[in-house]
Image (cartoon, rainbow, N blue to C red):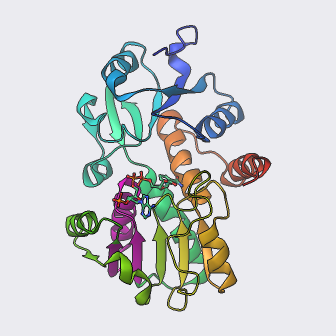
Amino acid sequence: MQLNANKKPQGQYGIIGWPLGHSKSPLLHNWGLKESGLPGVYVAWPTEPAKLKAFMAEVRARHIRGVSVTIPHKQAVMPYLDGLTDRAKVIGAVNTLFWREGKLMGDNTDVIGIKKPLLARQEAQGGALKSALVLGAGGAARAACAALKELGVPDVAVTNRTASKAVKLAADFGQRAVPWDERAQGTWSLVANTTPLGMLGEHQNESPWPADGFAGVGLVFDFVYNPVRTRLMAEAQEAGVACLSGLSMFLHQGLAQFELWTGKALDERRARQVLMADLLLMGG
Ligand code: NAP
């Protein structure tokens, strides 16, 4: 592992994960640093699990300003930290490392990434969500359950290919589980996809929802952000159902990270344009 020893330590940021395929975090944060006139650089640190301990030692030794954390390290980094935000404690996973009063802290900004687009839509349309079904029971689903709980959605259910994980996740948040085969049978104000189905690569042409099953669905939130318009979103829109893209989630979790690290709020509209332009260039 090399943490760019030549760069100024006070201005160094980056993302750790393994593998680190198509992350758009370097694009967003390097744009943000430039836009804010701040020195520094945000880089990708592909870090295999066996090297995590050494990586965390370097974060301290070099006082790396900010780290985004992605799969498979979101839980594994926690023992190396001095403290966690309340949200990170509730979710049991972190996606952001930052410094406060000399302490290396962990937060989870995915919840903000999920709440902000839902609140913006709620404000524009009026009317709170009455029910929500979370598809998947991994890390992103955990953040979704926490966000829906914070939003006060009265009826939240989780469904997952592996039923036992849905039951466990739902129980952790006082919510209910629905069998995967029965997922399209209910009526839901919101269906949130937290599975990788629809994502660029092997799952791109797949959807977690039957194309003829949108009658009882009010809104679809697809956490997948590459491509920007997934098969799930295309089929939902075809059926007249409004959609939120994972790009909005990615954008807001990233803006929240940037603010934690620098104290500066980036312009949301311009940041979205930067991401959109890049994703469209890639054919998303
Ligand atoms: P994870 O912890 O690995 O969980 C993946 C979930 O998807 C599991 O519940 C898994 O079910 C399910 N799944 C995987 N393959 C499936 C298939 N072929 N059919 C049905 N279900 C399947 O991953 P994660 O961290 O939650 O991330 C999940 C997705 O969320 C990512 O792929 C990414 O697109 C998206 N995400 C987006 C953002 C954003 O900012 N927009 C942020 C984080 C994540 P089993 O339990 O049965 O294996």
Q: Quadrant of the C terminus?
A: bottom right
Q: Nearer the viewer, residue 284 or 58?
A: 284
Residue lying at 25% horizontally and 49% vertically, measured from the top left: 89
In the rendered image, which quarter contains the N terminus?
top left
From the top left corner, tell me how far across and down residue 43 is, in percent. 57, 26
Residue at the far top in the pictured view = 6
State whether residue 10 is above or below residue 206: above
Indicate whether 179 appears above or below 99: below
Coordinates of residue 64 in the picture (x, y in percent): 45, 21
Question: Can the viewer see residue 102 in this picture?
Answer: no
Please tell me how many numbered marks the rendered image carries: 0
Answer with the quadrant where ligand 1 appears in the image.
Answer: bottom left
Which quadrant would residue 136 be assigned to in this image?
bottom left
**Position of residue 71 in the picture relative to residue 176 (left or right):** right
Q: Residue at x 57, y 7 (%)?
A: 6
Image spot of residue 27 (x, y percent): 66, 37
| Residue 206 counted in the magenta span | no
Position of residue 61 in the picture relative to residue 46 (left or right) = left
- Up the image or down, 35 lies above or below 131; here it is above
- Tell me, yes or no, if residue 28 can be seen here: yes
Q: Position of residue 206 (x, y in %)?
A: 57, 66
Residue 152 is inside the magenta segment: yes
Which residue is at the front of the view, 29 or 23? 23
Magenta region: 131-158
Name which residue lies at 47% across and 25% down. 65
| Residue found 62% across the figure and 42% down from its top | 24
Q: Nearer the viewer, residue 139 or 108?
A: 139
